[in-house]
Image (cartoon, rainbow, N blue to C red):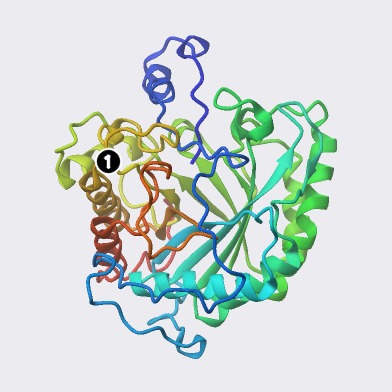
């Protein structure tokens, strides 16, 4: 999901690098500059009593088709995920607010998000949250006020677990100290890599323990750390993580590194943050977008990809977004059809290539997913509350795709 947007001049002049560099110049990575970048806050009382009844995803808010609120006891995924089934999921991004919400509030908010995802037909959820670094060359990683504690993370994760969701824990490096957009998590260069890995292991350990206690399915050990991939320091870090956490230890690669070479990471599963730029008109058909995605994927491997999960996919609901699907900052004219068509095409690719599933980017934990986004201030990547996109997601998640089945070499 990440954007770096470096200058084209820093890339060698070869056909492949020109192809890969062009989207960066145009702003094709999703830039999540977490600190100070978000946008509208939904200000709610510290109680569940003020929560409005959610609308049914795929129908306009206030259309009269909203169901009555359900109790927590009735909060249950229709068909809980089992091995071999597709992971139909959403990335939920959680920063603690300046005014720290009570435990009861965050549990109520988690139930609100769970109810919304159940309405979409989701069976999986990934909980992403920030950790911090001092800069591009820093050796130190840390939690800060916006980082949920392991105990708070556990409370939220418990709600999703009890509702029957497949769960992923996904700490992700905040980019505010990296001078974005030129600096991003994918080009960090710690002065001492051994010190960096020591610091990272110390930060991750309590979250690994909490995730293991709750029997989370996956722990993502790193996301979009292009410059650190292949470092020998990952081997002991992953080994320690696997000693603590009994589930799947994964790594989520950025789309550019994924298509351009081997991702050398000693993990049991690879996800891809996939924001492939496609040069087509806003009126492009689903088939045109599917062809565009397959052109990118074929650079890596042709045929089925049963060992790959799309860990992040999304696009701005705006004109021109196909050429820059992860552009977080730009706010061109709103175009819901662009977003909905993209979601439909991505789902088709996941099924045709027999992938493990897809997680849509994203819903912010403190937002009300039943409220249409305020396009004056909100990111165009927001999809909750956009009826056309919700309909596309629900159609995807309730399709008859049975999943990749038994793993085969991709």
Near mark 1 (Cα within 10 A), the count class, few <14, some 14-19 or many ≥20, is: some
Image point (18%, 47%), residue name: 286
- Residue 317, x across and y down, in percent: 30, 44
Vertical arrangement, residue 184 with respect to residue 55, above or below: above
Image point (75%, 54%), residue name: 204
Nearest the viewer among 132 and 250 is 132
Q: Is residue 369 left or right of residue 284?
A: right
- Residue 77, x across and y down, in percent: 42, 80
Q: Is residue 291 left or right of residue 211?
A: left
Image point (42%, 50%), residue name: 410
Q: Write down the residue under mark 1.
A: 334
- Residue 18, x across and y down, in percent: 39, 17
Image point (39%, 67%), residue name: 86
Q: Is residue 256 left or right of residue 212?
A: left
Q: Quadrant of residue 331?
A: top left
- Residue 382, x across and y down, in percent: 39, 50
């Amino acid at each position: 999901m990440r954007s770096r947007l470096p200058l084209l001049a820093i890339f060698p002049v070869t056909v492949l690098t020109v192809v890969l560099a062009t989207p960066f110049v145009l702003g094709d990575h999703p830039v999540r500059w977490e600190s100070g970048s978000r946008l509208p806050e939904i200000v709610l009382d510290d109680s569940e009593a003020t929560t409005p009844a959610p609308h049914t995803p795929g129908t306009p808010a206030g259309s009269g088709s909203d169901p009555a609120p359900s109790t927590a006891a009735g909060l249950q995924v229709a068909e809980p995920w089992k091995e071999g089934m597709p992971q139909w999921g959403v990335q939920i991004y959680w920063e603690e607010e300046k005014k720290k919400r009570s435990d009861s509030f965050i549990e109520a908010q988690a139930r609100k998000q769970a109810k919304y995802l159940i309405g979409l037909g989701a069976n999986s959820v990934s909980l992403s949250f920030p950790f911090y670094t001092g800069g591009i060359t820093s050796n130190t990683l840390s939690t800060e006020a916006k980082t949920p504690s392991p105990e708070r993370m556990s409370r939220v994760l418990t709600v999703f677990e009890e509702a029957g969701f497949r769960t992923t824990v996904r700490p992700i490096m905040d980019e505010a100290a990296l001078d974005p957009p030129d600096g991003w998590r994918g080009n960090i260069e710690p002065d001492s890599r051994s010190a960096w890995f020591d610091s990272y292991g110390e930060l991750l350990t309590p979250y690994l323990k909490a995730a293991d206690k709750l029997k989370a399915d996956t722990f993502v050990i790193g996301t979009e750390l292009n410059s650190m991939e292949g470092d020998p320091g990952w081997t002991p870090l992953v080994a320690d993580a696997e000693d603590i956490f009994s589930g799947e230890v994964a790594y989520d690669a950025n789309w550019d590194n994924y298509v351009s070479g081997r991702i050398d990471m000693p993990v049991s599963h690879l996800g891809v943050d996939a924001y492939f730029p496609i040069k087509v008109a806003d009126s492009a058909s689903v088939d045109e977008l599917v062809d565009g995605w397959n052109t990118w994927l074929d650079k890596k491997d042709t045929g089925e990809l049963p060992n790959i999960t799309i860990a992040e996919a999304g696009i701005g609901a705006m004109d021109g977004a196909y050429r820059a699907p992860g552009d977080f900052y730009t706010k061109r004219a709103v175009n819901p059809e662009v977003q909905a068509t993209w979601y439909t095409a991505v789902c088709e690719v996941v099924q045709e290539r027999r992938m493990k599933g897809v997680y849509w980017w994203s819903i912010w934990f403190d937002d009300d997913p039943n409220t249409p986004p305020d396009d004056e201030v909100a990111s165009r990547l927001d999809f909750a509350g956009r009826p056309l996109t919700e309909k596309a997601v629900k159609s995807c998640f309730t399709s008859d795709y049975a999943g990749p089945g038994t793993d085969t070499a991709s």
